[in-house]
Image: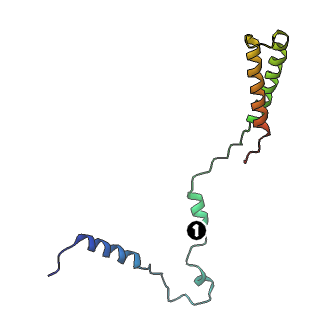
Amino acid sequence: MKEHNPQEEFEAAITRALEHSPELGYSPELKYGSESSISAIPADFAARVVASLPKQRAARPVIRAGRTVAIVAMVVLAIVLFALAPHVTPSFTSVTFYIELIVLAQLGAIAYWLAAKREV
């Protein structure tokens, strides 16, 4: 006597569903080679599908402000560098010397960022 196994029944049902091919409608009055036998899809099918889709929003333009901001930052840092230059004494006890080193490092980092190759 065979036991009732729900797992096997489930797998058999899935297999039957996957192996079942859909039946295509055939109309005996249509003859091979006639205009109407070429397509069983209505002529306005695509237009109806497109009309039923929601309207697409217009794509926003890509704003690439990074390069412009970097150039403006370089100009501001250069102005700060020239403003600090008369007050800097080249010693490690001077605060303005540290500020000038930081400004130079920032300028170098921005210049490297602008010059580096980037994939877009």
Q: Kindly state the secondary structure of the residue where label 1 is placed.
A: helix
From the top left corner, tell me how far across and down residue 94 is, in percent. Answer: 75, 10
Is any part of residue 57 visible from this angle? yes
From the top left corner, tell me how far across and down residue 77 is, in percent. Answer: 79, 22
Mark 1, other Cα within 10 Å: few <14 / some 14–19 / many ≥20: few
Q: Nearer the viewer, residue 23 or 44?
A: 23
Q: Nearer the viewer, residue 8 or 14?
A: 8
From the top left corner, tell me how far across and down residue 27 is, in percent. Answer: 50, 85
Is any part of residue 65 visible from this angle? no
Q: Which residue is mark 1?
A: 45
Classify the position of the N terminus by image quarter: bottom left
Residue at screen point 57% across, 52% down = 54
Classify 26 as above or below 54.
below
Residue 42, located in which quarter of the rendered image? bottom right
From the top left corner, tell me how far across and down residue 41 is, in percent. Answer: 56, 74
Residue at screen point 78% across, 27% down = 107
Residue at screen point 85% across, 10% down = 86
